[in-house]
Amino acid sequence: MSANQPPSAPSVTRLPGYTKADLEEILGTGDDPFGVAGAGLTWLPKEDHFGVRLDGRLVAHAGLLRLPVAIGDVETEVMGVGGVAVAPDVRGRGLAGLVLAAALDHARTQGPAHALLFCRPPLVPLYRRLGWHPLDTEVLVEQPGSAVVTMPLRTMVTPLRDTARLPTGRVRLYSLPM
Ligand SMILES: CC(C)(COP(=O)(O)OP(=O)(O)OC[C@H]1O[C@@H](n2cnc3c(N)ncnc32)[C@H](O)[C@@H]1OP(=O)(O)O)[C@@H](O)C(=O)NCCC(=O)NCCS
């Protein structure tokens, strides 16, 4: 960018893919960029990716994946959201909200009535602010070797339609977590 050009306004685009290099462009090369290594879980890569570039640099990401789930005795699907990341030097400017809004706009076209994500407890207020609600029921997820484990992180949910009502009861994801 030349000295007399204003910085470009952030806008979200659908990314053709999302590599380790893309993640490192946003969060750097640390070995636990999401702070969840302590949970010891294996995670699924996401299928659809949304990103924000500022002056060509990838600074924010959110990923989406449609997943089978049982909630109580209702077998259904949810849109899993994961890999939410904003570069440290541009946090606190609404970029997580921006990239999540684009991901949820796409999620609304996919059919499931709810989106679900897992986060560390300190991030619950941030996601609440963005319209998500914590689930207080047990959430079971799969792990390699046919193991089914209780999700130790917080589970947050948001409706994708005005009329969506989440069934009550325990949540059982029929996949690795996203
Ligand atoms: C978590 C993370 C994505 C947030 O990115 P960010 O760009 O700073 O977030 P935003 O600026 O979009 O903030 C989102 C909203 O939460 C609010 N918020 C931020 N921190 C908050 C807090 N501690 N408590 C309550 N609200 C908070 C913001 O004010 C904003 O609301 P507003 O738009 O109404 O003002 C970023 O810190 C990050 O990449 N962390 C490392 C990776 C990670 O842990 N990802 C989460 C995986 S679940």
Image (tube, grey):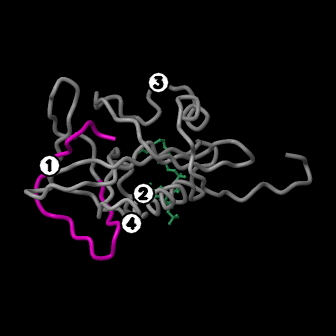
**Residue 106 is inside the magenta segment:** no
Marks 1 and 4, how far apart at CA? 21 Å
Q: Residue furthest bottom?
A: 163
Marks 3 and 4, how far apart at CA? 30 Å
> In the rendering, which numbered label is found on residue 31?
3
Q: Residue furthest left?
A: 73
Question: Do labels 3 and 2 touch, CB within 8 Å?
Answer: no
Which residue is depicted at the point 64% across and 44% down? Answer: 89
Identify the amino acid type marked 4. Gly
| Relative to 20, residue 67 above or below | below
Residue pointed to by mark 4: 131
Closer mark to the observer between disc 4 and disc 2 = 4
Q: Earlier in the sequence, mark 2 or mark 1?
A: 2
Q: Position of residue 42 (x, y in %)?
A: 30, 29
Marks 4 and 2, how far apart at CA? 9 Å
Mark 2 secondary-structure assignment? helix
Queried on whether the Cβ of the residue with tag 2 lies below 8 angstroms from ligand 1, the answer reads yes
Residue pointed to by mark 1: 138
Residue pointed to by mark 2: 126
